[in-house]
Image (cartoon, grey):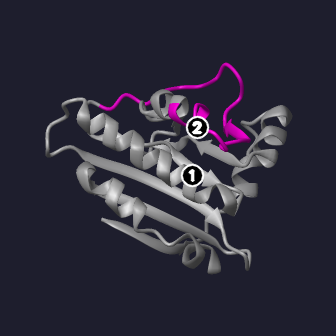
Amino acid sequence: MGNIKDSDFNLEAVIEQEVFSQETRSRALSADILLLPEFNFRSKGVRGFYGELNGFLKYLRKTPGITGLELLENPGEEKFLDLRCSDIWMPTIYIAKEALFQGVIGVASSYIYDRLKGGLSADVRAHLKLYSKTKNGKTKLFEYDGPAELLPKTLKGIDAQEFFKG
């Protein structure tokens, strides 16, 4: 369901893609928290965000201590992926500052919990990818694909010091 592993994800290479303007690249490189679109959705070359983006953004923006939040997309070019299921597809998150890690996973946990309180069925699944760079420069990935009701507990169980140790 949820696991932490080393990843070959290279944020700088993603940001340098020709599709992004220089302004977008600058904002992305200076971001503390970067929400990433899905690239090549369903192998059709489509780039877009999952539908949970707007709700999750509202949660992040109203959370004290959460700063430097950006979307990796050119202004006005945001696209949303059409998924016809009740699953909760969280945006892919890149956390640039270790100090924000616990806050972001806390917000994600609260967001999922509140979505479940809203009357979603018990068999709803949640999907989340969270990247960050460790102290030794490696990229780590936390990936979750499982029952939505277990995601908050799984997130709270992540040891940030262990995650960033590399």
**Would you name the residue on which mark 2 appears?**
63
Q: Is residue 118 left or right of residue 163?
A: left
Counting from the top left corner in percent of width and height, residue 151 is at: 33, 55
**Would you name the residue on which mark 1 appears?**
103
Q: Is residue 44 left or right of residue 71?
A: left
Label 2: element kind: loop
Q: Is residue 136 left or right of residue 132?
A: right
Q: Quadrant of the N terminus?
A: bottom left
Amino acid carrying mark 2 in the image? Thr
Image: magenta residue range: 59-83
Q: Residue furthest top?
A: 76
Q: Main secondary structure of the magenta part?
A: loop
Report which quarter residue 7 is drawn in: bottom right
Tell which of 52 and 82 is nearer to you. 52
Amino acid carrying mark 1 in the image? Gly
Report which quarter residue 41 is drawn in: top left
